[in-house]
Amino acid sequence: FFPIINQLEINYIFKQVGVTSQKTMKLLPASGRKATQKVVVGDQDGVITCFGIKKGEAVPVFKTLPGQKIARLELGGALNTPQEKIFVATGSEVRGYTKRGKQFLSFETNLTESIKAMHISGADLFLCANYIYNHYCDCKDQHYYLSGDKINDVLCLPVEKVNCITPVLACQDRVLRILQGSDLLYEVEVSGPPTVLALNNGNGGDSGEEIVFGTSDGKVGLIQITGSNPVHKWEIGNEKKRGGILCIDSFDILGDGVKELLIGRDDGVLEVYNFESADDPVLRYDHALSESIASIQGGCVGKDGYDEILVSTYSGWLTGLTTEPIHREGGSGEELKLSQEMQSKISSLRSELEHLQMKVVQEREKYQQSSQSSTAVSSVPAFSVNDKFTLNKDDASYSLILEVQTAIDNVLVQSDVPIDLLDVDKNSAVVSFSSCDSEPNSNFLLATYRCQANTTRLELKVRSIEGQYGTLQAYVTPRIQPKTCQVHQYQIKPLSLHQRTHSIDHDRPMNTLMLKGQFSFAEIHSWVVFCLPEVPEKTPAGESITFYFQNTFLGTQLESTYRKGEGFFKSDNISTISILKDVLSKEATKRKINLNISYDINEESVRYTLKLIHPKLEYQQLLAKKVHLIDALKELQVHEGNVDFLLPKYRSILEEADQLLEEYKKQPAHLERLYGMITDLFIDKFKFKGTNVKTKVPLLLEILDGCDQDGLIAFFEAAA
């Protein structure tokens, strides 16, 4: 622990509710003379639970009946008064409850989609479905906006400070959209897909215009939303490669009068940042839980006078980290008192555990008897799986995260396209590979991950090959009886390593693919969705659209512009154009649409792409050579007793052996992938000229082994 807040210790698990969604737990304001706060949480069973803590035990205040899944929970009330009214979004309905649990509002919005995000400010209600934003005042429709991509969160700047209603939408296309009424005021580009928004310091800062955002790739930033243009204040990167941000709160856990930034991530890491200087936040404390953190709040819950950070996890556990010293330094009387408290608590927990164990045994026997009777009806137990399949820009790999509400027994991964499984440090599961025949069944990968006891979250990493597309399937089997399994499918797209970006370098030499035909805007958009990741499934508004992409593996780029009847695709990589040409032709043929395809190939682009690839190729070849030398050098070291006689470069290989092996292990087949991409580039260059150069590939591979950039470029140009 960091010395400034080394007194922050894990307290105890307050309670477990059902599976919870993002931002569905809040602390009610303290009332009267009591300084402790009540906790209110909504789960996916539709139950709202409100409770307080007394002598370490959860004391219920109210609990509602089950219903539709609760997607969001917010506190509201009249402006400049305690925000103690509870509002929940469930389906297309918003319900309101008092702090005692009495329902006072049932507002059916008549939205065609379920509510995904909600914000409340006085009498104003801001709701978002996947693409639709609605603003209501006193439950009357005020404004409406259709977003170009999925909306992940919504917020409104504090009206009492900025004197106008300024909603902010966090959208999947790496953009914050600032609205004015039903119109877009301006867009703010951010470094990753924003997943959560929060007011800085809980009130927007001194100006009321400051918003903290968190992204799905683990970055956090502060932006000031002014009336005309945004001001980027600071951004925290994700050098430690931690999970995406799910929740943010501001609370003075140090008691120094300055609020700290509390962050919960989808890999279970809780972080506390404080502001030593007026500029950037500094990480002061972190704590790892075993599940994703859905909600985070700072307050006083367990004991008067001791602040806590309360979190709710995906499977519904509510856990507190307290500033109360668990190991006291007082006299013997105080130690005795603490000991008696702890003994009493341990005793009650033991009796509760014994009772639960007996109940489990009884229910298991009851199930066995009923399952063997002649009238038995098989029932499949339902369980919830929280999954996420995202492309990582840093290493051009896909992360597949599977989180289950109960312990995972095993996960079977199957793919009908060639993919590489990469090592994940946090993964403790034992993996075994099964041989599979790729010809009759299109089975290229069959791997089983056997999880250790109490593992509820599993992270896998895979790398695909562009041009080869199909389906990755995960068969998730939890440790429940009777044995049951859920299958989850993930599409590996033809240009799977491309990621959306805000802009590209227009000065690069570009190749162009032009399509014309009798197709609608919706049809060509569906083809682009099929080919490329991170494209919204909904057909964009307007007559035409332009998307920019970057290849995360090579750094090449793609510009895609299309409308009804025509499409233009520009890339500095001929292979990207070749893949698009083949796939788009195939999709059009399926729908019996004739395409007029033309292309403009820029010879200079091949030279440019080779220069882009070469440093990566050189680095991987050098790494492979070093790794192959390690065993021989270690043998020499054993025989000779020392390595003083070796050249410095060989001594450094021995010194760095562990790091080199670790890096090589994390990137299997990296060199082969680069060889494959250069080979494809060679074949594709001449394919557009109508020449088959596959017989010259062995000669190309010999040149690649020599790692001579000028020789490689000369071979490409002379092969014609």
Image: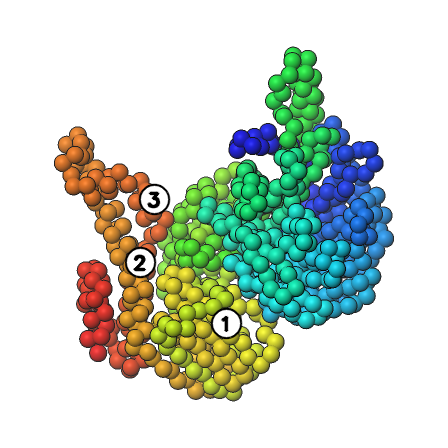
Q: Is residue 597 above or below residue 51?
A: below
Mark earlier in primary sequence (2, 1): 1
Which mark, by number, is residue 616? 2
Amino acid type assigned to the residue bearing label 3 in the image = Glu
User: Which residue is label 3 attached to?
Assistant: 662
Amino acid type assigned to the residue bearing label 2 in the image = Lys
Q: Is residue 67 visible?
A: no
Residue 608 quadrant: bottom left
Left or right relative to 95: residue 25: left
Mark earlier in primary sequence (3, 2): 2
User: Which residue is label 1 attached to?
Assistant: 547
Which percent across, then down, holds residue 284? 54, 38
Q: CA distance from mark 2 to mark 1?
A: 27 Å
Residue placed at 43% from the left, 82% from the top? Answer: 514
Amino acid type assigned to the residue bearing label 1 in the image = Phe
Neighbourhood count class around disc 2 (C-alpha, 10 Å): few under 14, some 14–19, many 20 upward: some
Mark earlier in primary sequence (3, 1): 1
Q: Is residue 180 above or below residue 234?
A: below
Neighbourhood count class around disc 3 (C-alpha, 10 Å): few under 14, some 14–19, many 20 upward: few
Q: CA distance from mark 3 to mark 2?
A: 18 Å
Q: CA distance from mark 3 to mark 1?
A: 37 Å
Neighbourhood count class around disc 1 (C-alpha, 10 Å): few under 14, some 14–19, many 20 upward: some
Total label count? 3
